Amino acid sequence: MTLLSIPPQRMTSEIMAQLEEKELIIRLTPSRDKHRLNVKTGEGRGDYIYKSSKQYGSHSLVNVAIDYTDFVNFGTHPDNEEFLLLGGIGEKKLYLLVALMLKDELVEKAANNTLTSNDFICLEAVFNDPELSFFVMKKGVPHGECAAGNGRPVTFYVTEGSELGLEMTNIGDYKFIIDEKKVN
């Protein structure tokens, strides 16, 4: 077994911007110029950021509770999902592990025994922040969550296709360790 020690990093605008630049997420911050729609006085309109594929069902809102300390459900979705990190008061920390590449490349690196901790980022989630707490995890990006610390199980929301499902990502004998002593 190969252990990958990954220090958690608190979500920041800079980190989230880097993940967006790598096309791994889409930040949901309506006041940013990227999502600002120009309308005249007396007008209104909406525009799609993306459309879910009909094959994954109707759109759904899911309440998620996490109380496991390992990334046991590390995988991908075949379509996008939105994270809505609302709440978090009196709850454990939420860690979100994100591969810095798509699934095929990650699986190939695992098969070649060339994965390193630099192939991932472990985010300590920030709740209730309009710049950080709302984003789209793009399809095919391996990710997983776990909880740490004291408090109630951590909860948050995701929206996704009602038939989306999770495809586990096979990384062989690699196992993740969160090194909380090295929090950035």
Image (spheres, grey):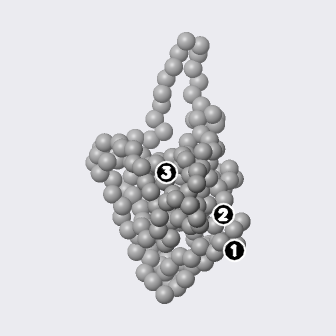
Q: Residue at x 54, y 46 (%)?
A: 86
Give the image location of residue 133, x and y in percent: 58, 48
The amino acid type of the residue labelled 3 equals Phe
Query: Height in image: 63 above or below 114?
Result: above
Mark 3 or mark 2, which is nearer the start of the sequence? 2
Can you tell which mark lies on residue 156?
Answer: 3
Calculate the distance from the C-alpha at mark 3 to the C-alpha at mark 1. Answer: 25 Å
Can you tell which mark lies on residue 9?
Answer: 2
Evaluate whether residue 143 shows in this view: no
Mark 2 or mark 1, which is nearer the start of the sequence? 2
Give the image location of residue 76, x and y in percent: 41, 62
Give the image location of residue 80, x and y in percent: 43, 50
Calculate the distance from the C-alpha at mark 1 to the C-alpha at mark 2. Answer: 11 Å
**Which of the two marks, 2 or 3, is nearer to us in this view?**
3
Q: Residue at x 56, y 57 (%)?
A: 91
Query: Height in image: 111 above or below 33?
Result: below
Which element type, helix, strand or loop, lies under badge 1?
helix
Q: Which residue is mark 1?
A: 181
Q: Is residue 156 left or right of residue 90?
A: left
The amino acid type of the residue labelled 1 equals Lys
Q: Quadrant of the C terminus?
A: bottom right
